[in-house]
Amino acid sequence: MRSAREVAEVLLKALEDKDLQAGLDRSILNSIPLIKGTLKRNPYIEDLAKRVKKAKDEVLGNIEYYIDKTMDNIRRFKGVAHFAKTREEVYKILDEVVGSEKMVVKAKSMVTEELKVREHLIERGNEVWETDLGELLVQLDKSKPMHTIVPSIHITKERSAQLLRGLGFNGGVEEVREMIEFVRRFLRERFVKAHVGISGANSVDANSGAVILVENEGNIRHVTNLPNIHVSIAGVEKIMPSYIDAICQAMVQAANIGTYPPTYLSAITGPSSTADIEFIRLYGVHGPKELHIILYDGGRIKVLKEGIFADQLHCIRCGRCQLECPIWQLAGNMWGGEVYGGPMGVIWTAITEGVEKAAPLALFCLNCGKCKEVCPMDIDIPNMMSELKRYYHDIRTS
Amino acid sequence: MFIDNIRRYRLPLPVEASVLTSWAYDLEIPRDKEVVMYTGGLYQLVPYIQSTVNYLEGLEGRKGVGLAVKIGKALRKVIDFAKVIAKPSRDAVKRQMDILKAIALALRKINVDFGYLYEEEPYSGVLLHDLGMEDEFKKHAKLVVDLFKERGVKKVITIDPHSTYAFKHLYPKFLGATDFDVVNYIEILAKSDFKGRCEDISYVIHDPCIYARYENLIDELRSIIEALNVKYVEPENSRELTYCCGGPIEVLSPRLAKKVAERRVEELRRYGKRILVACPICYANLKRAAGEELEIYDLSEIIARCLI
């Protein structure tokens, strides 16, 4: 287990990182007023958040039942349902479905970061591209996402231009518009050639197996539509009891990011199909011919049973707590584990990497309660931080 | 080091008993009362916390021996402590004493009858809990509860957010129901009908996180200020959305704590030069970050100036 001092050194180093600091300042300055304005203009989001929380209580209280139900209904709508308990099981499924020497396009998704899906598929001899602009920059930068929704806040436009030069971009560092145009052209070829598209899921409806996805760039539409095969990976906590609850979760998430309504809200139930000739339903038309949905446990079910960190599974991954946390504002996801950072990220680190990883991080929680205050799911993060602090001390003294 | 001090001296920093109690002698506050005003030593320690944290900040950048070992060696005894840590100025010490007196006088003004335990007053132990040392905290809390019982304390009037939170929430959580009632002085004052004379000065409110988000003492604070006829401004991060002063991590990383405070100061100064706080920890940290740029006042200082 790392010591408090080792964590302090990482945090103090983050203070010296000028790009990170500038990025953090910009994202805080721009996003918080946007989010507050969005929530003020759409007061019904607060009611929807309450509805989502209740729906999540129902699912998390009966998780096995809902996993089975979701799997059954994915199959009913001609999708292929998978359940993976561990990372290795996910890899095994991907090896079967994707294989090697394929072109793979990816949507940004934290659970695929957690599983290191990109790295695994590359290792298996596939060409893999992140298609969310920010995540593509993170891929090229070989760093980690600094925020759940805006992963590239630590990458300046100068650095972006430099990274894109590696792909053939030859415009100036001030030409952000040109960079976007370049990436659009660059990825367009790959979207068309791709055999497999991989996405996460904002939520999954247990009644239909529908996968809900929120985005603004339009890359997810390509990822989930152009390749022959679409694989969606979702943590089991993303299951919602009904189609409308699943949509509500996506709406609440989008509003708490401040881009509301989102440019695109996709609901995908089964592979593409037609019944236009004699009412006989056939699968595989313009969109994917196969849809695989992997419900991933990764320690979540155990967490639900043990109770200590169960509250975190209500998380809709909006990243609002990150933006509002005084420590995250100074260090970004450098205050975190390998994947998740900030208030929610320290607890997610405890869930996905173990309490020993998370405990020393938790010491730097101010216990100021702001994360809980702004969390649309009212998750008691400070309370779980206290548990981690206690754990740190117990290990140190034993 | 702080833990060791709490074990030995029942306080996070080893200071002479007179530092803690001298304020009360002037007011001749009685000892034996069922209702006591509880300071937890926090206001009295503010000048010493400031010196200590400044000292730690100097050590923080240096490589080599672990910070904890260095400060542990340096600050273990009263004598060593006095040698290493710069002695706070008389003015700084007096100011905190005046704050305590102001709170006591305000309570007297509205006819609250109370005593004070003087050198017997124990520290709440809240720092132990904040650092995750729950077993130590529980043991310490038990001592406090026993002491209150022995001294016949039935009701504790708290004057800072941290002790309030400890007594109201943590003690019952770890020890079950306690035999004494806990009430914060802001709650008492908000319920009374005192008046103040108008001061033509406006203050920017900095809500302590604990009052705002854990104790829901938001409107009470404002009703006191309004009753005093004092003007105030709400910054963007106000009420339930107030912003932390950085204090809770000042012993882990003084530099990081100061950075948090600087962000808050940056916001507050856009609204005005005079800041109203209601927590000794907030006072110490915002002061450390703001220097002479802002004037920081404790609520009780404004009460003392304006109460008729």
Image (cartoon, coloured by chain):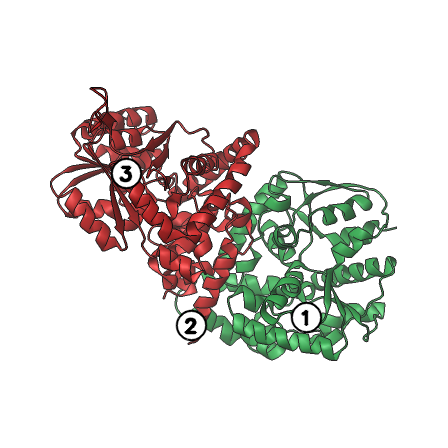
Task: Answer with the quarter of the image where residue B168 lies.
Answer: bottom right
Side of B199 relative to A208 (left or right)? right
| Picture disc at residue A120 | none
Measuring 52% from the left and 59% from the top, which residue is drawn there?
Answer: B249
The residue tagged 3 is: A76
Classify mark 2: helix, strand or loop: helix
Chain letter behind tag 2: A
Along the line of sight, which residue is nearer the eye, B159 or A191?
Answer: A191
The disc at residue B178 is 1
Q: Colour of chain A?
A: red
Q: Which chain is home to disc 3?
A: A
In the rendered image, is residue B81 in sight? yes
Q: CA distance from mark 3 to mark 1?
A: 58 Å
Q: Position of residue A94 (x, y in %)?
A: 19, 46
Above or below B160: residue A42: above
In what element is the residue under mark 1? loop
Discs 1 and 2 lie in a common subunit: no
Q: CA distance from mark 3 to mark 2?
A: 52 Å
Q: Chain of mark 1?
A: B
- The tint chain B carries is green
Q: CA distance from mark 1 to mark 2?
A: 31 Å
Where residue A99 sits in the image (x, y, percent)?
13, 43
